[in-house]
Image (cartoon, grey):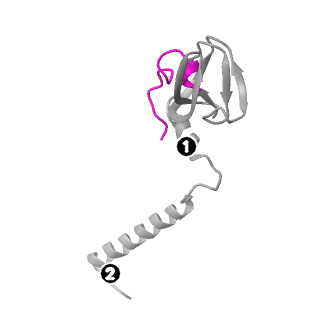
Amino acid sequence: MQRFTSRSRIKLMTAAAAAILVGAGAAAPAVAAPGQQTERAAATVRASQTVVTWINGNVRVGPAVGYRIAYTVAPNQSLSAECWLVGGPVTANGISHDKWVLLSDGNYIWGGLLKGNEVGNVSRPCF
């Protein structure tokens, strides 16, 4: 029968622990699936902020006027927002800039439609 010294037991336990860690890592996906929108998924983990519209306007599926309209909003409507980003430029209602807010529902609203600063006082940029 083979005898294990303390040193060989430590090596054996270290190798076993490493194998367990490698096996556990293999179960997690290494990369996002093609077409998966990781920016939106990451944004949903963060706490949302409330923004309020000052005028009626369009909420779009992307951060530019070239994207289709998802729905329209009325003045003084509260929306849940995740973060803001630079998108397509817009000039309307005497305001001109390119800041868009990602809403919690995955759609975008141009910051010029929101009360507050040009991003509706949303503090977090989208990464």
Give the labeled residue for mark 1: 39
- Residue at (63, 56) in percent of width and height: 33
As helix, strand or loop, the secondary structure at mark 1 comes to helix
Q: How many marks?
A: 2
Hey, which quadrant is residue 104 in on the image?
top right
Give the image location of residue 90, x and y in percent: 58, 27
Give the image location of residue 84, x and y in percent: 51, 31
Which of the image's four quarters has the N terminus? bottom left
Q: Earlier in the sequence, mark 2 or mark 1?
A: 2
Hey, which quadrant is residue 105 in on the image?
top right
Residue bounds of the magenta highlight = 110-127
Q: As rendered, which of 2 and 66 lies closer to the eye?
A: 66
Hey, which quadrant is residue 72 in on the image?
top right
Give the image location of residue 98, x and y in percent: 53, 30
Which residue type does callout 1 highlight?
Glu
Q: Residues within 10 Å of mark 1 (few under 14, many from 20)?
A: few
User: Do labels 2 and 1 touch, CB within 8 Å?
Assistant: no
Which residue type does callout 2 highlight?
Phe
- Residue at (65, 52) in percent of width and height: 35
- Residue at (57, 42) in percent of width and height: 41
Give the labeled residue for mark 2: 4
Give the image location of residue 16, x and y in percent: 42, 71
Q: Measure the alpha-carbon separation of dots 2 and 1.
A: 51 Å
The disc label shown at residue 70, or none: none
As helix, strand or loop, the secondary structure at mark 2 comes to loop
Q: As rendered, which of 120 and 95 lies closer to the eye?
A: 95
